Image (cartoon, grey):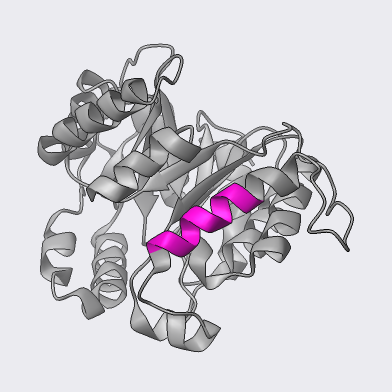
Amino acid sequence: MGAHAGMMPGDGVGGRFCPPIFLEESMRIGLGLPISDPVVLLDWARRADAGPFSTLGLLDRLVYDNPEPLVALSVIAGATNRVNVQTEVLLAPLRDTTLLAKQVATLDRMSGGRLVLGLGVGGRADDHLASGTELRGRGRRMNEQLAQLRDLWSGEPFGAECGPIGPAPVRPSGPPILFGGFKPAALERIARWGDGFLSAVPPHWAGDLFDSVRKSWHDHGRDGEPRMVAQVNVALGPQRVVDDARAAIGAYYEFSGWADNMVSGLRTTPDEIRTTIKQFADLGADEVMLYCYGSDPGQVDRIADLIG
């Protein structure tokens, strides 16, 4: 099944011509996978692996009807050959650190180093209640987890009475880590522990965050530049696809009180998607993740045709 199955070159939504985007060679486009039906994710993954996409991302919740991301991405990694798999973002404070270290290293090793670990602290009280963890102090807990994860991945024993916890990841320091968030503590965590930033805000907000991340990176004496990854919610296809995505976004963000804002920010036309990608490219993003809440896997083919 090719990335353009069932479509003629140049076909767009409803048969309209959608000229492809011509991006800088270093600019990558990934897909965020829908969570409403885990059964369709292998179809999504195989189409994306055959197309122009760099990464497949999957979000994390505990008290919600979504697949567990490390398990789901392990299955996806086994069904694909090329694309990276990325947690977007994994809520580390909900998890036991040593087990998390082992799970992540296993997926990283078995996928041939295709795992990118996006991490965040979360903030839903029900997730913490269900996991038996404290909502307060979750940022401090994640900082402690990060130090321990790095030690375990490098082969350090777990205390005086335990040996190392394997397997070893592909890199001695573990897979690349991106951090989500927008508060100063979250951005500073990138320079201390991470490899880059995962931004889920629109381009007109992202510029200042990108600048803050880069400044913190250099203030901490890090070499090179942090990786910048932007997330954009999209739905491309017939009205039923757009309606499906809007309903899914509204349900997911209902707890927050700003679900309407998230729904209104959904990009639903080729021009809107092209414009947003170009805006992030101008800000220096290395990758844009087009997050699809609608479950129709035909979106993979439509977006592949759009980006060329």
Q: Is residue 38 above or below residue 175?
A: below
Magenta: main secondary structure: helix
Decide if residue 241 is on the left or right side of residue 143.
left
Residue at 24 percent across and 36 percent down: it is 16
Question: What quarter of the picture does the N terminus occupy?
Answer: top right
Where residue 42 sits: x, y (%)?
Answer: 64, 56
* Residue 253 vs residue 208, the one in the foreground: 208
Residue stretch in magenta = 139-148
Decide if residue 101 is on the left or right side of residue 195.
right
* Residue 255 vs residue 307, the one in the foreground: 255
Residue at 14 percent across and 76 percent down: it is 257
State whether residue 125 appears in this view.
yes
State whether residue 121 appears in this view.
no
Where residue 276 sits: x, y (%)?
Answer: 20, 34
Which residue ends up furthest to the front in the rendered image? 160
Q: Is residue 173 above or below residue 248?
A: above
Residue 253 on the magenta segment: no
Q: Is residue 17 above or below residue 249?
A: above
Decide if residue 302 is on the left or right side of residue 232.
right
